[in-house]
Structure formats: structure tokens, C-alpha cells
Image (cartoon, rainbow, N blue to C red):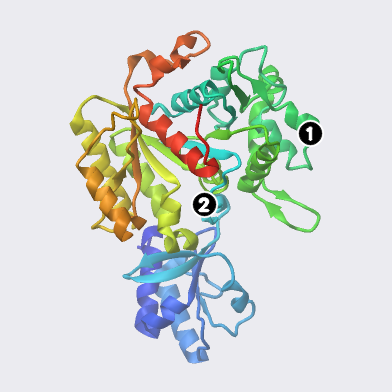
Amino acid sequence: MIYFDDSLPKFVSLLVEELGTNAVEDGLFSRDTSGRLSFFSATKLTKKILTRISKLALSELGAYARADRPIADIDDFGVSELFSERSLKLSAAGISVRLLDRRLVGADWLRAPTTEKSDPSRFVFASIKGGVGRTTALSIVAADLAAKGKSTLIIDLDLEAPGIGSMLLDDGTTPDFGMIDALVEIGLGKLSDGFMADLIGPSALADRKGRIDVVPAFGRRSLKNPGEILGKISRAYAERVDINGNVATFLDKVSEITDYFSALGRYDAILVDARAGLHETTASALLGLGAHVFLFGLDEPQTFHGYEALLSNLVRIDVIADAKADWLSTISMVQGKKTDSEDDESSFATRCDALFKTCGLISKTKKSNRFFAAAEPFSNVPWDDDAEIVEAELKDGSSDESIDILHVLYDDQFFLFDPNRRNQLMTHQVYKTPYHMLLQKVESVMLSHVGEKFE
């Protein structure tokens, strides 16, 4: 019996035996929305070969072979155009092949990542599961930037489990509309400046020097009409098709909204709270916003199983596969709720190394970077023997494949985090120790973008 995981390797092996490795690597596989496969040869094949392979595919793959045309060559109708479409690059049966993966949902996971944008700096806070400290960390970063006199916009993309809005806003500052409304309305037409202004609520938790604005998932209107929220969610995820047939996916809609706020010139940073898990909304945040991405997790199997699924998919995208170093420079792994134990830190780092090597994002001989935060005060620089290794890699260019590993220390003061009731948690003296590495990384990225010192 053939199952989904067996189908492509089985088909590849069959074709290699019939056509040879080079012909299969030069060709193109297609998987339809049900999982059925077909193969398109980049060269002309005889009718005899086409007939033979069609019969073999239907016999050996069963339901996983496309019944009407399991194989076609470059001269067949419409085949040549397929080779110019975006495809995945992956390994199957020991060779590298290209795959057009037709999906009813999840198409945004096939998109090439947007180049990192710097005006303003953008940061995405993502995780595989909830309860890892992701949203709390985002709030602390916003508070720290405000204390430095910076203006920050927070966008809540966690439409099905929103939290940042109620965490940083109150009844008086919650705006009329939320991100869910913006994603519905943009599917029908251009959003007005007035509507966009009504998406933003100012947080009273900002230091007097700076500003924190929040686009919550749900605005005041949704909270007053909770029975309409599920109807809005289904439409928020829907594609927009214009009169010319151009399609805008969820990723495109989120990018348009974020770009609008960026163009205002009002903010120094945009922080996005992504939905936990492998949902379509996560793809838009990780690939479509041109952001530095913080991937949060605990030192537990669930974290690494989930990220293996995510990263194994991303490495199949041609742009990432061909330029791993560029993409990896926009990623930081963040261990949440780390204890004081050195073994705890070492275990997480070791698992991150294994994860990225298993997924093919770094070579098996490489060692992942730790991010070395600036000391306080500057003259008291922390030293680590590993720093010599990192420096050596930079000199010889071998740091092309490396990842940042950060940690947030566990502090029970932040358990059941509610800054509206306990606003002392948002003061530098309280949060500086557990969040030091993360805050320094944010500052480092922003300095690389604008080249100016923070106050």
C-alpha cells in the first residue's frame, strides 16, 4: 500500500530506472491538491516510453498517480510554461528534484522570503506553541524601546488566540477596528486613511520618552459583537481576486497593511506577534514582512519537532536553499524560561545545532553562534572561549552558515504577566536581567539598519 510519504520517492525511483538520474533531475514533478503526482520531462520522449511509464506509474503508485497524465514531455500542451513557475527543491530517493506543490491552503509557505526591511526595523515574534513567553517578550522589547525614546508599532497577527491587545490596551484606548477587520475589508477594496487610523490604540504603558501603538487582533466593534468574530476570521484568510484576475493571498494582504504603517515614517520599529503553530498566518509573518524573526521555544521535544517541520519546508524554497547564509542572518532561536543551569542552556543549544543540521540549513561540521550581548557597563566585557571560534569563522568566511541562539531567563515575576495591573514589570531595573540578551539583539539589528546610537 502506498501512502503520501511513500509516493514521491517511489515515483522518483521508478523514473530514474526508466530515464536515468539526469533526466529526472532536469524534469519537474507536480503534486495536485489531492496528492496525485505527475512528471514533466524537460526533453522529448517517444510515445513508447510515455506509454510504458504511464502504465508503470498507475500500477506502482495506485491512487497517487495522476490518472489522465502521469507523465508528459516538453512538447506536450502547456508543459513548457510549467518550468517557469515557482517550485520547491527537495531530495527524494537520493537525488535532487523540483516539485510544483499545488495546495488548497498553505500556499504562502511556498513563497520566497522578502528581503529584510530597515525603515523602520521589523521584528517577528513566533513560536510553535503557546506558553513559551513570546508575547511577554514582545511587550518587554516595546517597553525598552519606549524608554529609549523610540516609537514602536505592535501588530497582533494571532487572530485565533489574541493577547497583546488586552495586555497593552484598556477599554479607553482599544481602537474601533482590529487586524481582523483590516484583513476582511482589504479583501473588498482599498483601505482609507481614516480606517487605518482607527486600527491603532496608544498604550499607556509607554515611557514618557517614547510611544507604543498597538493594532490589536480585535477592535472595540468586534468585542461588542463577538458573534461575528468567527465569520470575520474565515474571510480574513480568504484570497482577494481583482477584476483582472490578480490574486492577493493572506501574506500579500498583511504585507500591504504593514507597508502602509511603515510608510508613515512615524515608527522606529514594528513588532509583530505571530500566531503559534504552522498556520498560514505564520507563513506571512516569517516570509512576507522582511523582518528579523525570533523563534521562541522551550527545551522540550514539542519545540524541536515543530520547528523541524517548519524549517524542512522552508529549505525547499529555491531562494533559501541557494542563499542560506542570507536567510539565516534574519533568524534567532530564543530559549524561553531558561533556568540558571548551564546544562539547560547547553542542551537547548545542542538541540538547535542538531535541528538546523538535520534540516540542511547548516553543514554538519559547523557550530552555531551564540549572540554575545554587550556588557553593562561597556568596559566590563563578558568573555567566552567560544568567542575565539566565532571570530575565526568570521575571518575565513566560514560563518556563512550560522544561527543566533539567545535565551530569556525564567523569572516568576513575569508569571501570569499583566502589565496593566503590575506596571512595575515594565521598568528597566525589573526586566533587564531576564531579557538582556534579547534586548541587546534588537538593538544590534536596529543599529545595523540605521547606524545611530540609542539614547
Relative horizontal placement of residue 11, taking residue 245 as reference (left or right)? left
Rounded to the nearest angstrom, the CA distance separating label 2 from label 1 is 30 Å
Quarter assignment of residue 56: bottom left
Q: Which of the marked residues, 2 or 1, is nearer the chain's N terminus?
A: 2
Look at mark 2 in the image and give the residue it sits on: 109
Q: Nearer the viewer, mark 2 or mark 1?
A: 1
Q: Residue at x 60, y 14 (%)?
A: 204
Callout 2 amino acid: Trp
Q: Residue at x 41, y 64 (%)?
A: 90
Residue 157 appears in view: no
> Who is closer to the viewer here, 32 or 388?
388
Residue 104 appears in view: yes
Do the residues bearing badges 2 and 1 touch, measured as CB atoms within 8 Å? no
> Who is closer to the viewer here, 336 or 270?
270
Q: Which mark is residue 193?
A: 1
The N terminus is located in which quarter?
bottom left
x, y percent for residue 449: 53, 43
Callout 1 amino acid: Asp
What element does badge 1 sit on? helix
Relative horizontal placement of residue 347, taking residue 188 as reference (left or right)? left
> Dot 1: within a 10 Å radius of its alpha carbon, few (fewer than 14), some, or many (20 or more) residues?
few
Q: Which mark is residue 364?
A: none
x, y percent for residue 38: 50, 71
> Who is closer to the viewer here, 36 or 90?
90
x, y percent for residue 119: 61, 42
> Who is closer to the viewer here, 177 or 117?
117
What element does badge 2 sit on? helix
